[in-house]
Each structure stands twice: as C-alpha cells, then as structure tokens.
Image: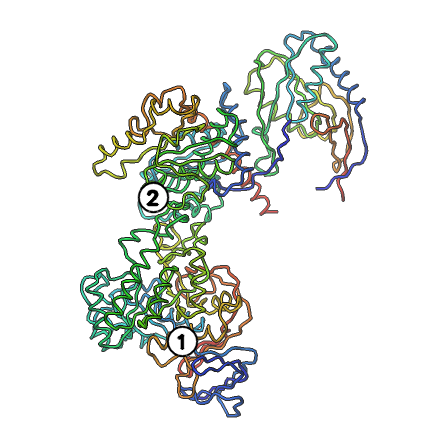
Amino acid sequence: MKILIKGARVIDPANNTDDVRDILIDGAKILKVEKTIAAQADNIIDAKGKIVMPGIVDMHAHLREPGREDKETIASATTAALRGGVTSILAMPNTSPCIDSAESIELLKNIIRKTAQMNVFMCGAITKNRLGKELSDITGLEKFGAVAISDDGASVDSDEIMKEAMQHAKKKNILVLCHCEDKSLSADGVVNFGFTSTRLGLKGISRESEYKRAQRDIRLAEETGARLHITHVSCAETIEFIRQAKKSGIKVTADVTPHHMCLDEEAVLEYDPNFKMNPPLRGKEDLAAIKQALKDGTIDAIATDHAPHTENEKEIEFDRAEFGVIGFETILSVAITELVATGVLSWPELVKKLSYNPAVILKVNKGALAPGHDADITVVSPDKEWQVTKEGFASISKNSAFLEKKLKGVVEYTIVSGKIAYQRG
Amino acid sequence: MNTRKTIVWTKKDLLGLEYLSRQEIELILSTAESFKEVTTRQIKKVPALRGKTVVNLFYEPSTRTRVSFEVAAKRLSADVINISTETSSVKKGETLVDTGKNIEALKVDTIIMRHNCSGAAAMLARHVSASVINAGDGWHEHPTQALLDMFTLKEKLGRIEGLKVSIAGDIAHSRVARSNIWGLIKLGAEVTVCAPKILIPPGIEKMGVKVTNNIDEALAGADAVNVLRMQFERDQSNAFPKQLEYFKTFGVTRERLKKAKKDIVVMHPGPINRGIEMSSEVADGANSVILEQVTNGIAVRMAVLFLVAQANERLKNENTD
Amino acid sequence: MDFTEKAKIMDHEAIGRSITRMAHEILEKNKNTKTLCLIGIRNRGVFIARRLADSIENINGQKVPVGVLDITMYRDDISNGSAQPVMHKTQIDFNISKKNIVLVDDVLYTGRTIRAALDALIDFGRPKSTQLAVLVDRGHRELPIRADFAGKNMPTAENESVEVRLKETDKIDEVVLMEQKK
C-alpha cells in the first residue's frame, strides 16, 4: 500500500525542512521526501496549500480506561486524538487499577493493542496507587513497555522516595514526568491564589505550591542524573527555575498545556468549571512568561493534559467540579490560533513543540518525516476556520475550555503507520 | 425635579454587585424607596407580582434572609415556596442544575438561592430561564444584604458618595464584605477593611479598599462601620479564648466609639454575637441601625424581585417576537 | 416606534384656560372644599394637579391638599413586558377616607392607568367619592372609565398619540398631536 502526498508545505524540524515537497509512503514507513515524486501510488493526496507535519506526540493525556469508561475509552480517546492530528499519546497511569505493576501495565497494554487507533505509549506510576508511600515496580513497568513514570495528579511528597524513583529511572533510562504540586501549600484550592481567589470567594492554589516542588524535583534530578520532565507548567517562577536548570546542564524538559498558554485566571470569573484545572489558570504575567518560554525554548513541548470528565462531575458547583479539560481535538487549532497567527512561534517552531521535541524527550521513533521513519503524518489546512461545539467532539466527555471558540486550522488527514486513520468528512 | 438619566434594568438575575453598574445599583436603591413607602401603609401589599411564583431555595440554614425574602415576595402578591435542604431531594444527590430545572418545570418565575458554594448562583442562572437572585453563595457575594446596608446608609446620611465606611470582621470568608465593597466603591465611598491579618484575603486592595489590622484606626473618622459576624463555629478548637481575645482587640465597644465620630452609623448584618464582635451597649445604642437594616431589607428585596421579574418578562417577550 | 409631530393642539394660554375652567367645574361639583383632595398620577398628572390646586386657591382662597401617586406597582402590563417605567415614590400625606378625591392625569386613553390608580387608592383608604380630571381625553377606551373633568376632548386615530409637555418637566407648556411613522 503506497500513499503519495503531493504539493504540500512540508515542515520537518528534525531535518530542517520547510518547503514544498512530495512524500511517498510505503507500508508503515516513509519512503521518500523529494521536490517531486512521480511514483505510482494506491492513494494520491493533493495537498496543495496544506501543511504536512509529523503527527503530534501528546506526552500528557488521561485516557480513563481501565476504570472510568463512562468518561473515555482508549477507543474513543484515540478517535478523538486522530481528529486533532495526534498520532502518539503518552497515557497517564491514574486509572483503575493504577498502572503501578507488571500486571496492571499488561492489562493496559492489551486494551491498547485491541482498541487503540494510534500509538499509545504508557506511563507507569512512581508509587503504588500514586499514594506517594511506596515505590511501584519500576523495573516491571519498564520491562512491559513504560517509557516514563509519573504520579501525575499528585506529586511524591517524600524527598527520599522521589530520589529513589529517579535513581531507578536513571538506571532504566526512562523519563520522570512530574506534576509539581506541594499539597501542603495548595491545600484544597481551586483557582489561582490571589486577587482572583479573593474576588471569587474560592480557595486559592498558590504559585509556591508549584515552583517549590519544581525546585525540589530539579535538585533531585541534578543529584541523580535522571531525565526530569516538568509537565503543565503554569507560573513564571517555575519557568525561571527550569531556565536556570537548563543553563547549568541539568537534564530537565517541560511542557505547557494549550489552555495554560492562552488563557489566564480571568477566564474563571464566571465560575464555569470548564476553566477549572490543576494547576489553575494563572495571571497575565505568567501567561506572558509562558509565551516567552515557548519562544526561547525553556518550554520544550505542548501537551494536552486531556482530562475527560462527565457532565455530572463537571457541570456542577465550581468547588465540587473535577479538575481538567479535554484537549485532543483542539490542541493543534489552539496552537495555530494563539501562537502562530499571533507571531509567538513560527510554523517550524510549533511543529517542534508538538511533534519533534516530545518524541525526543520520550525517546520514541516519532516526530520526523525522513525516509525510514514511521509514517505518522498530519495534513492541515492552516487557515481554515471552525467553531468548537460540544456536538462536534468525538471524545465521550465534552469538557472543553474552548467551547464556542472560533479557531484556525483544520486537520484534513491523519496518517498512522502509513494508513489513513482519519480523513475529514 | 429629578434630572438623573433614567436607565432601564435589563438583567434577569441578580448574582452580585460586582456585575452591576453604579446606575443599576442606584436604580435598585431608588426603586426600594418607593417600596419602603408601601411598607409604611396600612395595607402593605401591592399587586405588582400577582400570579408570579417565587421559590426560596436554601442549601444553608438561614432564617432572617429567607424570611425577609418571603415577606418581600408576599408584599408584592407573589406566591412563595420554601425549599430547604432538609425537605428536598438535594440530599439524594441531585445536581444543582437538575434541581433548578425541576423547580423551573413547576413554572416558577424567580429562584432565590442561598448556597454554601461560591458561584452556585451563577451556575444555576446559566441553566434556567427563571430569574435567579443570589441570597448568598459561599464566600462570594450576598448582594441584597449589601444593597440594604447601602440603602440604610443613604437614608441615615443622605448619600454614599464620599462617605468613609469601614468593614470589620472576617473579611476573608465574608460574602457580605465582598458585596459591600463592590457596591460602596462603585457609589463613590471610601472603604477600609479591618481584620486580623489571617482574615484579610490576598489582593483585596485591588478591589479599591484600604486595609488595616487596627479597629481604632478603622473607626477613626469613619462615617459608618459595618461589623461582620465572627463565625467561630467554623473553628471549634479552643474557640472561647479566641473569642475573648477577638473582643479585646477588635470588638466594637462604647469606649472605642467615644474616639470615633459622634454620629458614626453602626451596622451589623446579623445575627449578632454580643460580646464578640460588638458589645451589647453598642448593638442597642444610639448609633446602631441594626433593626432599621432589617426593615429596609424588605423594601430592597421587593425592589430586586420587581426589577428582575420585569426584565425577565421583557426578555421572554423579545424571544417570542 | 417613531412618532413625528403632526399638530399643536394647545399652547400655554390654552392649557391655562383649561385648567382654570376645570378648577371652576371641580368647585361647582364639590361645594365642600374641606373634603376635597387632588391626587396627581406620576409624572405629569402631579403637575396638573398642583396647577389645579393653585387655580382653586385663586378662586376661593382655599388650599386643597395634593397627593402624588405612582401606579407602577399596580400596572397590568408587567406580564407582557412592555412596562419599563422607573418607579417613584407615592406621597399621600393625608387620610383619604371619607374624602372626595379628584384623580388627575395628563391624557386619558385606554383607561388602564386610571384602573391601576383606582386599585392603588383603595389600598390607602375608602374615599367618599373618586372623580377624574384629565387635561386631554383622546378616546379609545378599553375599560368603562370616563373623565368627570376634561380640559379638551380630542378625537384621535390609533396611530396617533397625544403628548403633553409641561414647563415643570419639559420646559414648555404645550399639547401636541403625534403621528406614528409608517
């Protein structure tokens, strides 16, 4: 089975390509990327005026299966992700059962094999049941394919346990992905601590709760030599610590979510729980710092933190609503609208954040379009506009922070392992 | 002659004073003056909301606010239904939105809601076409309390603009404080909040207030002081010494008032903890307008009920046109 | 709805003459001025009531009390949403029971305002009689209500309206016939 994509603007930061090219796919791999390819193919995609990029590698997502199939399944999540131009996902371990052992990861692996429509990489838990008390079986997790460990949704409070985890991770050469939050400082807050929490009469989540924990994790990464990835960065101080750590050669990388890179705390003023997330939306200065960090490379990647929740858990009193929003189907369009159209990032820089860098950080063979690479490709109409609606989502859950927004950029095709997995209807 | 530019009330809900313009607040206050006249008549009832149904939906126990709204609605000839957590299905795990929609299915025109979660009124208002009046949501707002406080102040002192008003008590956890601050600032008063440091919420200065931790400073030169209820019941641990301690450092007493303006207006949203935030002498003294606040509450709530009902009718007619 | 001016019906002098004539008629019908009270309906009815009281005082030297009635809370059109009045205070500082009340308004049209005013009055007491004085009666009644005293009877079409302008509110005394633009 051969696919020929013709006449697109091909953006492949791995090979410094940003030019009109044809791409020939043979089987699961890319065969050729050249100015003009005159080969026979089973399927020819005329992609004039479109952008072709390596499929998005989303290194932070909650697929909810096993355990909460009412919110999302691996089948529905990957269907949704395809529509958003995503071809690889890193699945967080906070499922039921928690992915903290060889048995649980094998269970997950089986579901992925049977129902996933794309590459789903697995992230194991750092501690058993993510309780922060006892290390999980990191060796077993790695053996069954975990590429990273994380207690995402929580952070390991004990310095000793965290250090030990990093030492294991270093030995197995897997990534340690950290949700930085010191619960003793964030307590049961629900919005940014400060004027916003005061104004809304809600409990605040302080910035310290994030950056102090980031500081600690960076210190431990330095001590252990583990590869640390700080996920969903939300405040300026955290960014500054990461910037300094990078300068001094510590192996730390970071991502930001689409919502944290374009919304600030004022979005919460109407108490819409679709703006309730952890970490919370922060101030305007933080938003500016995030954009700057995306520009200067302090933030390496954009990841959704796709967190589906049912209406019963989300469309309720703000205090009681679950944290988090879905993101697969809007990540690319939000990034185009908020970063490229506004001049924060160029197209090649954006593709780096969405595809190339996360693949490098996870050490997976993705995120590039060179011959011999996996044929995971996204074809986009960069200027076409669309409106986000609940009805339009393929995710089972509809809790998006971008409902009713008009966005730029429509995914036309998503190709996974050389097969057209999604084509816009 | 009244030269004020007439403005029209267009909001179906009253969620908080933060969301109102100065003109809208003034419209409520002037409408309340008309209703206050009604409360002085022998026949204290007008047919303005005849045939309308008003529901008091209370997720938190409250006698005074609920009764005040009930009296107000009845004096407007509306039918009133009271629903409290003890008697409703809310305990059975029904969501707020479902409860709201079920109430609306009874063809109710206005829902007055008290809820312990900040933002609950906004959530309800988004999901029902009935008018929603916030009767207190968490620590967020209690707009009708602040409106009746301002009405009383205006009645006593003739104006709000330029007045120095201090608010003393647990500012951090007080919806009464927030609503008063928004309203008073919009109407041009100078507002000072006074509390122990831990009860001053972060960034409060951005609302336009001064902050002090000294009650004498808050009283000095003030035209009025609004003393909030200290809710020690939320912190049971050795509450008693704390209460005494609070009274010593922050309690409004006759001695402290001697150093204030002679005719300083003393307000309290009730119920009073005598001997904690305020001494009995002050509560019952010449400067106190606490009972007048209760009376004015009826007029202010009649005005709010009337205005939102009228605006909602207009909205519905526009939609069917 | 856009209205344009069609014709001037009354000027300052004509309004003055009508008020004087109505004052005489009121006195003729209400020989005992001790029980006579005027109640003006907000807004312009109030000023016409005050002018009538002044005129009565000029005629016989008697001061007749004037009350102010705001009928917003008694209107029957809140439910169709067309009402958007700003409410003002009602001020009736005298007991109306056993009195002969003359309600005063600027224009009598459907009669609904007067219906509301009658309802409102009942809440204040039980007058011996209630009469109605209007500066202009333009017809088109929707209720069995008529004016006892009218400054001017002015037959109008449905697409017309009558606007009373008074010095106290509009800086000029005049009554104008308005026509709705088609």
Q: Quadrant of residue C94?
A: top right
Q: Is residue C11 above or below residue B317?
A: above
- Count up the numbered dots: 2
Give the amino acid type for the residue marked by disc 1 in the picture: Thr
Q: Is residue B182 above or below residue A329?
A: above
Q: Cβ–Cβ below 8 Å for labels 2 and 1?
A: no
Q: Which residue is mark 2?
A: B89
**Dot label at residue C138:** none
> Circle 1 marks a residue in which chain?
A
Q: Say which of A281 and C156 sits in front.
A: A281
Give the amino acid type for the residue marked by disc 2 in the picture: Ser
Q: Horizontal placement of C71 versus B54: left or right?
A: right
Q: Say which of A171 and A21 sits in front.
A: A171
Disc 2 to disc 1, C-alpha distance: 46 Å
- Horizontal and vertical percent position of residue A153: 30, 61
- Horizontal and vertical percent position of residue A406: 53, 62
Count neighbours of disc 2 (C-alpha within 10 A) and say few if under 14, some if 14 to 19, many if 20 or more.
few
- Extreme residue toward the front, this view: A248
Q: Secondary structure at mark 2?
A: helix
> Circle 2 marks a residue in which chain?
B
Q: Is residue A242 above or below residue A19?
A: above
Q: Which residue is mark 1?
A: A87
Q: Say which of B296 and A75 sits in front.
A: B296
The mark lying in front, picked from 2 and 1, is 1
